[in-house]
Image (spheres, grey):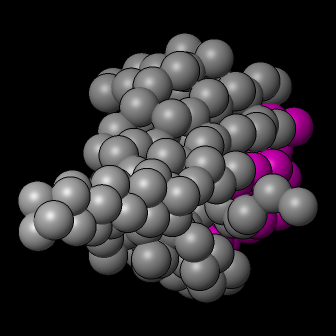
Amino acid sequence: MLRSTLLAAVFAVGFTTAASAAMLEFHATMNGASEVPSNKTAGIGEALATLDTAKKELTYTVTFEGLSGPATAAHFHGPAAPGKNAGVAVPIDGANPTSPVHASVTLTDAQIKDLDAGMWYVNVHTAANPGGEIRGQVLRAK
């Protein structure tokens, strides 16, 4: 009896954990006007991401075009509200990334909290705009 009760409890915890896991979708639209300070670039970009809350894994695709020159770097930054700058949270594809970038990264609990609160942004850097040429706030998809 005790064994069957214990097994039932283990299964219940397992199902509760699996049921509480979620796949959260995020999106960012990047442009020069969103950079801090803003700039007048023709560059645009987009980031699409999915967070697997059970694995704490963020899978993302970042695309960009029309930049003033080749990308020299790209990053997710945070925590920062729109109009504010922050340090690098996750580098994207090392030096000189090319579009599209597809990758996955494991996040910490603090990073997940900031991401879900809309406190991350993504940007792409160029030689002409070393602080960032295009930027977009990463928000939960509706």
| Above or below: residue 51 compared with residue 38 | above
Point out the image quarter for the C terminus.
Answer: bottom right
- Residue extending furthest toward the left: 3
Residue 93 in the image: state x and y as whole percent: 39, 26
Q: Nearer the viewer, residue 136 or 22?
A: 22
Look at the image and tell me whether residue 36 can be seen.
Answer: yes
User: Residue at point 51% right, 64% down?
Assistant: 20
Left/right placement of residue 107 relative to residue 78 reads: left
Left/right placement of residue 6 relative to residue 82 reads: left
Residue 92 in the image: state x and y as whole percent: 42, 35
Left/right placement of residue 134 relative to residue 115 reads: right
User: Residue at point 63% right, 31% down?
Assistant: 62
Q: Nearer the viewer, residue 14 or 133?
A: 14
For residue 28: magenta?
Answer: yes
User: Residue at point 38% right, 63% down?
Assistant: 12
Residue 140 in the image: state x and y as whole percent: 73, 63
Residue numbers of the magenta segment: 26-43
Residue 29 in the image: state x and y as whole percent: 81, 50
Left/right placement of residue 89 relative to residue 103 reads: left
Look at the image and tell me whether residue 126 can be seen.
Answer: no
